[in-house]
Image (tube, helix red, strand yellow):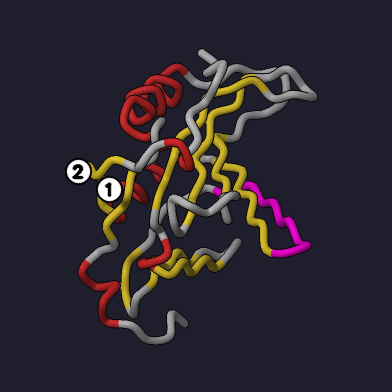
Amino acid sequence: MAHPNPPTLASSEPQPGSWTADRFFALLAELSPHRVISVCGPSTFEAIIEFGPHGFAAGHMNAITPAYHWHLRSDGLGVIRSVDTIHGRSGRRVLHFELREHASDERPYLHIYLHRERETDFEPSRERRFAEAHTEFAGGIAIQPPKAAAEGGDPS
């Protein structure tokens, strides 16, 4: 169901929980495919990906596939919030995660949507799994980086 008034991170502190970076990225693999939207200054980049093999080294989450290379600084994970809403233009239900470095950040730097083809429903197992995670992520969760993130260094 759509959340008529989704909570904002500015109005509530993210809750610490049992979610680690390792557990979150394992969930993303389970919920693939995704539409990932990265916002950086005046640039917005979107890509549809199958998230799969990944690891943590040199202070980054590293996912390297033939289709893409993704390096995300582990200590920048910060706060993750899930959203279940209706898209304004299309009227379609959308399920996604918003990533912010800090709870006080006005806008997320990354949106990770559960992707589906037009005019199709979410697979019931993906929808159920997202709903389970959404019970914890809806108000925002502070994610702890993996221990390997403390090593620092170049991800490439």
Q: Position of residue 106 (x, y in %)?
A: 58, 50
Which span of residues is magenta-colored?
41-49
Q: Of 16 and 70, which appears nearest the observer?
A: 16
Q: Considering the whole magenta stretch, tell me its main secondary structure.
A: strand
Q: Earlier in the sequence, mark 1 or mark 2?
A: 2
Q: Is residue 82 above or below residue 145?
A: above
Most extreme residue toward the bottom is 153
Q: State the image coordinates of residue 125 (x, y, percent, origin top left).
A: 40, 21
Q: Nearer the viewer, mark 1 or mark 2?
A: 2
Left or right of residue 61, residue 35 in this image: right
Judging depth in this view, the residue of 27 and 152 nearest the camera is 152
- Counting other residues with Cα less than 10 Å from the Cα at mark 1, is it few (<14), some (14-19), or many (20 or more)? few
Say whether residue 48 is magenta. Answer: yes
| 14 left or right of 48 in image | left
The amino acid at mark 2 is Ser
| Residue 148 magenta-highlighted | no
Q: Which element carries disc 2, helix, strand or loop?
A: strand
Numbered circle sitting on residue 23? 1
Label of residue 8 in the image: none
Amino acid at circle 1: Arg
In the rendered view, would you say 30 is above or below 1?
below
Identify the residue under disc 2. Answer: 18
Q: Residue at x 54, y 68 (%)?
A: 69
Q: Are marks 1 and 2 in contact (CB under 8 Å)?
A: yes
Residue at 37% across, 66% down:
74
Image position, residue 39 (x, y; %): 67, 57
Q: CA distance from mark 1 to mark 2?
A: 9 Å
Q: Looking at the picture, does residue 35 appear above or below residue 117?
A: below
Answer left or right for 39 relative to 95: right
Quadrant of the image occupied by residue 22: bottom left
In the rendered structure, the answer to whether residue 148 lies left or right of residue 102 reads left
